[in-house]
Amino acid sequence: MNPASERLRVIEGDITTLAVDALVNAANSTLLGGGGVDGAIHRAAGTRLFLKCAKLGGCATGNAKITPGFKLRAKWVIHTVGPVWSGGGKGEDELLASCYRSSLKLAREHNIRTIAFPAISTGVYRFPLDRATRIAVETCRAELAQKKLPEQVTFVAFSPEAFATYQRELSAS
Ligand code: AR6
């Protein structure tokens, strides 16, 4: 198996187009859709995703739930709910790390080999990008060092700035 560092990569683009086993969605606690990446995933997956999500009973911040990907190229969507940034004193860092850990745990339980994450909480939820990127990379790196699955984690940056931020963090030891 490759070392954990070789199993993490960043690309810039639209997560909904990727042919990975699972996409992670930055959802809200209702799981009933919204704007940003959540809206894009629901539009691309079709109404069956909404109907499936409506039966899940919501999701707590820091947790994750899984559905099929329906019309997406990805077989699965893992819906996780990031924290709303409110200054950093409300457990936001730990809740964000928990999103990554919970998503990777669900992925392992479904034998998912390849998974793509958006920059959870860094849009509407206003988590500072540098800080969120560090948590994303450190948390995934630590998980991959301990587990065989997923084999590869792709971080999907939606701007050149986010791409550069991930690259910087991925090249830091
Ligand atoms: N592909 C990849 N990344 C994207 C895409 C895309 N198609 N679209 C946006 N991003 P956000 P949050 C990036 O706001 O902050 C929703 O309404 C975006 O640039 O989607 O966790 C939910 O329903 C940003 O870096 O999610 C919740 O109510 C990142 O995805 C709330 O927003 C996350 O931005 C969740 O807020």
Image (cartoon, helix red, strand yellow):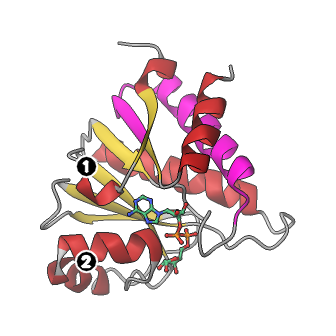
**Quarter occupied by residue 152:** top left
Comes first in the chain, label 1 or label 2 = 1
Residue 117: x and y in percent read 44, 50
Of residues 119 and 31, the one drawn nearer to the viewer in this rendering: 119
Of residues 144 and 122, the one drawn nearer to the viewer in this rendering: 122
Q: Residues within 10 Å of mark 1 (few under 14, many from 20)?
A: some
Residue tagged by mark 1?
A: 18
Q: Which residues are magenta?
A: 127-154
Cβ(mark 1) to ligand 1 < 8 Å? no
Q: Amino acid at mark 2?
A: Arg
Residue 55: x and y in percent read 27, 85
Look at the image and say whether residue 93 sits in the magenta stretch.
no
Q: Which residue is depicted at the point 37% across and 25% down?
A: 148
User: Real-space Cα distance between discs 1 and 2?
Assistant: 15 Å
Residue 64: x and y in percent read 44, 63
Cβ(mark 2) to ligand 1 < 8 Å? no
Residue tagged by mark 2?
A: 43
Residue 73: x and y in percent read 15, 54
